[in-house]
């Protein structure tokens, strides 16, 4: 892939191109989906930056880098409305979901059992993981809505669902590794 220019002026009228060349409104559901996946990827950039100074960084940094690559694949999958183009692109597959499950299982046993909901916090890395989790959930909702009207990748919804679970566990685990208290919801203290 070669990108020569940052601007093309092609979107100045509120339209953009899907992979394959179809022109659609920038408010199109596909654009909203892959734009939100891109936003999720950007929040994971914050996570990776926070992991540099976290004790969880050595373990979780490579995982997040892998996930960012997978999210780019998912974004291109969502940006390809044309089945012929879609067949040429890297896809999110069952093996990616299974790897997330292994990542979750490897860390979840280290965590204390929950007695309440976790509030975002627990240090920088943990906080950014929770931010990413909420953006992931929004991406999942948007992709579910798109899937109700259009064919999308077979594993897109499952991948996002499992990723949000993973981000939750990663946030908790990074707080534990960094010795940060995990803030819990205390409904009677309001």
Image: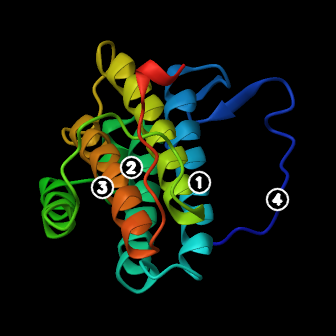
- From mark 1 to mark 2, how far is it between C-alphas? 16 Å
Mark sitting earlier along the chain (4/2)? 4
Distance between the alpha carbons at the discs numbered 3 and 1: 16 Å
Cα distance between the residues tagged 4 and 2 = 22 Å
Q: Is residue 159 at least partly visible in the picture?
A: yes
Decide: is 172 above or below 81: below
Q: Residue at x 21, y 60 (%)?
A: 100
Residue identifier under label 2: 74
Q: CA distance from mark 4 to mark 3?
A: 37 Å
- State which mark lies toward you, 4 or 2: 2
Q: Give the crowd class for mark 1: few <14, some 14-19, many >=20 residues within 10 Å.
A: many
Crowdedness of circle 4 by 10 Å Cα count: few (<14), some, many (20+)? few
In which quarter of the view is residue 83 placed? top left
Q: Secondary structure at mark 3?
A: helix
Q: Earlier in the sequence, mark 3 or mark 1?
A: 1
In the rendered view, would you say 27 is above or below 23?
Answer: above
Q: Which residue is mark 4?
A: 6
The residue indicated by pointer 1 is 43
């Amino acid at each position: 892939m070669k990108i020569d220019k940052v601007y093309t002026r092609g979107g100045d009228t509120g339209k953009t191109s899907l992979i394959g060349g179809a022109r659609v409104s920038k408010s199109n559901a596909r654009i909203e989906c892959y734009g939100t996946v891109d936003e999720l990827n950007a929040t994971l950039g914050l996570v990776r930056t926070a992991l540099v100074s976290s004790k969880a960084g050595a373990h979780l940094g490579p995982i997040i880098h892998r996930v960012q690559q997978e999210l780019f694949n998912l974004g291109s999958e969502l940006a390809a409305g044309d089945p012929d183009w879609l067949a040429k692109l890297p896809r999110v597959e069952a093996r990616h979901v299974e790897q997330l499950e292994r990542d979750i299982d490897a860390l979840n046993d280290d965590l204390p059992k929950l007695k309440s909901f976790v509030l975002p916090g627990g240090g920088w890395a943990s906080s950014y993981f929770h931010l990413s989790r909420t953006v992931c959930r929004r991406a999942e909702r948007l992709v579910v809505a798109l899937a109700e009207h259009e064919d999308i990748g077979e594993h897109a919804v499952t991948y996002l669902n499992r990723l949000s679970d993973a981000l939750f566990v990663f946030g908790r685990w990074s707080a534990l590794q960094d010795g940060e208290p995990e803030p819990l919801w205390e409904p009677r203290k309001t």
